[in-house]
Each structure stands twice: as C-alpha cells, then as structure tokens.
Amino acid sequence: MKLFIDTANLEEIKKANSYGILDGVTTNPTLLSREKNEPISQLEKICKVVDGPVSAEVLSLDANGMIREAKERAKIASNIVIKIPCTVDGLKAAKKLKSLNIETNLTLCFSPSQALLVAKAGATYVSPFVGRLDDISTEGMDLVGDIRLIYDNYGISTQIIVASIRHPLHFVESARIGADIATVPFAVIEKLMKHPLTDIGIERFMNDWKKLKDNLQIK
Ligand code: G3P
C-alpha cells in the first residue's frame, strides 16, 4: 500500500519525505487555507519536494469551470493530480480530463455508487472519506471494503485512496482491505512507528549495556 501525506504544510512534507516512505501528497482547500503562502506557489513548492502525485483541488462546481481550472493546475508541475468532487459535473470533467491525459482524484466519496461511476468516467483515483463517515456513526471502512470488492469484480484500475484518516487503525485496516493508497495526516504518520514496548526495550538494552560496561570498567 502506498502512503501519501494529507497536508499542505511544507515542513511536515519534508519531514515525512526524509523518512523515505512517502509516495505522494494530497491537499484540499482547507489544508491550503492553513498555510501562509499563496496556494498556487505553495503547490509549486510541494511538487518540488515530492516526486510522487500531488493532488490539487478545483473550486468550480460546473464541469467547464472544473476543466478550465484543471488545465491551469496541471501547468504547475508534471506530478499534479486534479482533485474533483464526486458530483455529476465532476463525472463529466473527469471523463474530459481522462481524454486529455490529465490525472484525476475524485474526492468527497461517500458511497459505493459514486465510486463505481467515477471509475466508469475514467478517474485515476477515488478518495473515500472514512473519518467523516465515522463522525456520523457510519462505519467508514465498510465503504472502502465495498469499493475494493466492486473494483475487483470488474477489474477496475481506478486506485483507492483512503482519506480522512484519523488514527493508525484506519491505516492498518486500509492495508487489510487492500486499498491502493492511504493518505495520512502527519500527526498520524508519526504514530505509525510508535510502540511503547519498543521504547521500553531500547531503554532496557541501553541500561544493561551501561551496567555491563560499568562492571567491566570499559568505555
Ligand atoms: O483527505 C481528506 C482529508 O483532508 C479530510 O480529512 O479530517 O477533514 O475529514 P478530515
């Protein structure tokens, strides 16, 4: 499973990239609004740091506007992927962008029917939002399982990006289900390698080594 970071913060992206496990970035208007920089120049900077796909969202709600914005965003860098909401206009835009060889990420996906239709329109990626479903007492990961099943039934190549991830269990469950990608906020990425028994184990090894050296009086 690929790991994307879900942020527009350059420091977080650089840090996660330095771990050697980062495959891409997803942004959205909310995440970009948290940064001081002008959004297009922020996206340019992000694309210079990361080789993998960087999702940038359009703000238009009509297909023609989405296509116009997508063409503009695609000029930012060769690794830009256009994020489009799962609406009827989004479908029309995705189909057109596919014919122009512009990659798309159909976002705000909350149902298997949306996921099937965006795949039929030629979406490169679909982003089911698991955390926001959990927020309304609906099992978000069930949606990912349904999409995996449906895509496998028909050999669909649209890649599933599990989004709105809130904790490490969402990440692990995504891998169990066979999602293609998990896009994870930096705070959650940091938790993925943490285990108290690892920390306790390191501390014990260090102490025992120190005791050994003290006993033998070596440096
Ligand atoms: O990738 C989508 C993500 O940014 C939304 O997350 O936590 O706002 O539901 P959240």
Image (cartoon, helix red, strand yellow):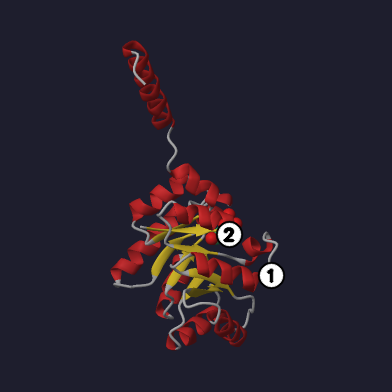
> Are circles 2 and 1 on residues that touch, CB within 8 Å?
no
Specify few, some or many for label 2: CA neighbours under 10 Å numbering under 14, 14-19, or 20 or more. some
| Residue 51 visible in the current orientation | yes
**C-alpha separation, residue under disc 2 versus residue under disc 1:** 13 Å
Q: How many marks?
A: 2
Q: Position of residue 116 (x, y in %)?
A: 41, 72
As helix, strand or loop, the secondary structure at mark 1 comes to loop
Q: Position of residue 15 (x, y in %)?
A: 51, 52
The N terminus is located in which quarter? bottom left
- The correct choice, above or below, for 108 with respect to 99 in the image is above
Q: Position of residue 207 (x, y in %)?
A: 40, 20
Using the rendered view, name the quadrant where residue 151 is placed: bottom left
The residue sitting at 65% across, 70% down in the picture is: 39
Q: Position of residue 4 (x, y in %)?
A: 46, 59
- The correct choice, above or below, for 194 with respect to 138 in the image is above
As helix, strand or loop, the secondary structure at mark 2 comes to helix
Q: Which badge, 2 or 1, comes first in the chain's sequence?
A: 2
* Residue projecting furthest to the top: 215
Instruction: Inspect the image, locate mark 1, and give the three-letter code of the amino acid beneath it.
Output: Glu
The residue sitting at 50% across, 58% down in the picture is: 5
| Residue 164 visible in the current orientation | no
Instruction: Judge left or right: residue 174 versus residue 167.
Output: left
Residue beneath label 2, please? Answer: 10
Task: Determine the quadrant in which ligand 1 lies.
Answer: bottom right
The residue sitting at 62% across, 85% down in the picture is: 65
Q: Which mark is residue 180?
A: none
Frontmost residue, 79 versus 64: 79
- The correct choice, above or below, for 13 with respect to 62 in the image is above
Residue beneath label 1, please? Answer: 38
Specify few, some or many for label 1: CA neighbours under 10 Å numbering under 14, 14-19, or 20 or more. few
